Amino acid sequence: MHFDVMEERLGRWGWSLRDAYGQEIAHSLMPYASRVQASAAALAFSQLVACAGKQMRRP
């Protein structure tokens, strides 16, 4: 899996998480003013997912 950070519209950036086949499995819902802000948001999202995975309850 990997993140793509791209300019969606002029001056509006976003991120998308893609699986090994390139299919989008998650994306940012809000636009960011810069590539740096979108990258930081993607990193924060990845850390939240990692934390959620550690707390996942097993049946």
Image (tube, rainbow, N blue to C red):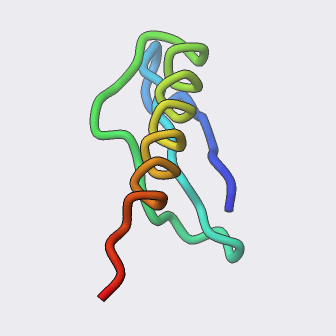
Q: Quadrant of the N terminus?
A: bottom right
Q: Nearer the viewer, residue 1 or 48?
A: 48
- Where's residue 6, x and y in %? 58, 34
In the rendered structure, the answer to whether residue 47 lies left or right of residue 27 reads right
Point 29% across, 30% down: residue: 30
Considering only vertical position in the picture, is 33 above or below 16?
Answer: above
Farthest residue to the bottom: give it.
Answer: 59
Point 43% across, 26% down: residue: 9
Q: Quadrant of the C terminus?
A: bottom left
Considering only vertical position in the picture, is 40 above or below 34?
Answer: below
Q: Quadrant of residue 12?
A: top left
- Where's residue 54, x and y in %? 48, 58
- Where's residue 21, x and y in %? 68, 76
Q: Quadrant of residue 43?
A: top right
Q: Quadrant of residue 23?
A: bottom right
Considering only vertical position in the picture, is 53 above or below 32?
Answer: below
In the rendered structure, the answer to whether residue 57 lies left or right of residue 42 reads left
Q: Nearer the viewer, residue 57 or 30?
A: 57
Considering only vertical position in the picture, is 59 above or below 25?
Answer: below
Q: How many marks?
A: 0
- Where's residue 31, x and y in %? 35, 25
Point 60% across, 35% down: residue: 5
Point 37% across, 67% down: residue: 56
Q: Nearer the viewer, residue 26 or 49?
A: 49
